[in-house]
Structure formats: structure tokens, C-alpha cells
Amino acid sequence: MDLILGLLVQGAQMALVLALAPLLTGFVRKVKARLLRRKGPPVIQPYRDLARLLRKEVVLAESASWLFRAIPYLIFAATWVAAALVPTFAIGLTFSWTADLIAIIALLGSARFFLALAGMDVGTSFGGIGASREVMIATLAEPAMLLTFFALALVAGSTQLSTVAAVLATPEVGLRVSLGMALIALVIVAIAENARIPVDNPATHLELTMVHEAMVLEYSGRHLAMIEFAASLKLLLYLSLIACVFAPWGIAAPGAGPAAFALGAATYVAKLAVGGFLLAFFETSIAKMRVFRVPDFLGVALMLSLLGTLLLFVSRGL
């Protein structure tokens, strides 16, 4: 009975991230529009867009291979699994032993590799430009993310997310400069990985500036729906990761009852709302930078994560 209940709770978490991802994207767009004194689209517009794309016919280029058709499903599956691994409303779930920080980086790296491969598969100039820029961003974002996770692992003594969240929620950890550096580095990486302003503008199709959109220009129909859904899941993943690690309040403990799960779910939705509002406020307060300035922006994250890790090594006398 306990096993069945654990599987149901784990399935509820997987369904929760799947249901909230388009809502988070719509909420960010709505807040950005209101901050710019525009009405903006409804919050549920991403659901309508996905339903419309799923009904449309797929148009494929003559030079597209079988890999071009399979990649959208691979990207969606890898991103969904990575998002479902991050504890949302509870820790210590049935598959919490698989929720490892290194595993999440591997899944995201696999999705990025396939997306860049899809951009080059058709052989268009836009796809090649987007793929090269995506790889350039990844070469700086991934090391910064790894160093950030190493800093968290040094504090918690583990790379398992449930353990990290449980340790950082204790008052013994307190406020640390190293954790503050890791938080800023992770936020910068999240902005770059999700192609948000100032690194990229998800609402533009200018060939001189776009990164993510350049790689998916040849997709349509259900294939484009899978990629757009995966992009929403990726944004939710990073906000969930920041909330789980640096704001682990309200998360239900292992073996908690339905009331604790409901409170954890409500707290999780509130955290997503705060994170989405801060993201929209940041994007409306800053201009997009040039592509050649992106390495400098990500270099800040790399240096901060490195300094945070070194501070922890020095404090431990290693």
C-alpha cells in the first residue's frame, strides 16, 4: 500500500510540472505586458497555442532526416524527466534517489545537443547560426552550473536534491556568502539557458539576434508543439530548482500526510508566481545585449560559482 501511495504522489509531481509549465509561461508574458501598460494575451494562451499546433499538419523540409522528426520528442522527454526530478511540493518521494544534480545537468545537456543537431540537420543558414550560438552559450553555462552544484554539494554533503533541500532548510546552515554567489550564478545561468533577455529575446525572429528561435524555424505542427512545451518545462525546471535549493520552505517531509502535500503544492505555486514576476520585472527593466557580450555575462556566473566553491574549500580547510 505504501508503494502504491508513493507512486501516486510521484506521478502527481510529474503531472503537476506538466500542467504548470505553460501556465508559468503565460503568467510571465502577462506580467511583462502589464508592466509595459499593455493588456497582453490571456494567461492560458500557451495552452491554446499548444492545442492549435497539435492540430496542424507537419511540414518537413526535403533535406530533413529521420533524426529531425525524432528530436522534438527526445527533447521533450529529457526536459520533462529533468523537471520531474526536481522536488516541488515534497522531498523523499519514490524516485527521489534519481534526483541528482549531475543527472539533471546530463539530461539538460542531452536536450541541448539534440536541439543544436536539429538546427544543423536541414542545412539552413539560420539553423547553423543558432546552433553555433547555442553551443557557445553552453560552453560557459555548463561549467558555471557544475561549479554551483559543487558548492551546494559541499554544504549538503550530497548531490541528491532531497538531501540538499533538507540540509539547506535547517537553521544551522544560515546565511553564507558562498551560497549567495551560487544563487546569483544559477540565476544568470537560468536566464541564458532559457534564452531570456538580455541573452536572447524569445519574442523576436530577427536573424541577427535570435538563438533558440533560429534552431526551430523549420519545425511546425506537433513537432513545434513538443519543442515549445519543452521550453516551458525548462523555464519551470530552473525556477523549481532555485526554489527547492535556496528557498526550501514549505516542502513536505518524507512520510507526510495529504495536508502537508497540499500545503507544499500551494507554497510551490506561490514560489513560481514570485519567480515569474521577478523574471518579468527584470526583462522589462533591461535591454538585450549584443551576442558578443554574452560570454562576459556568463563569465560573471562562472567566476561567482568558482569563488563560492573556493570559499567553501577554504572554510573547511581542504
Image: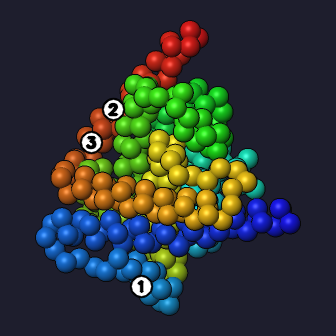
Q: Is residue 234 visible?
A: no
The secondary element bearing badge 2 is classed as: helix
Q: Is the N terminus in the top left, top right, bottom left or bottom right quadrant?
A: bottom right
Q: Residues within 10 Å of mark 3 (few under 14, many from 20)?
A: few
Residue 57 image point, x, y percent: 50, 89
Mark 1 burial class by Cα count in 10 Å: few <14, some 14-19, many 20+: few
Q: Residues within 10 Å of mark 2 (few under 14, many from 20)?
A: some
Is tag 1's residue or tag 2's residue first in the polypeptide sequence?
A: 1
Q: Are marks 1 and 2 in contact (CB under 8 Å)?
A: no
In the depicted structure, whether residue 7 falls above or below residue 137: below
Q: Residue at x 49, y 34 (%)?
A: 148
Residue at image coords 52%, 46%: 248
Q: Nearer the viewer, mark 3 or mark 2?
A: 2
Q: Amino acid at mark 2?
A: Val
Asked if 23 appears above or below 153 in the picture, the reply is: below
Nearer to us: label 1 or label 2: 1
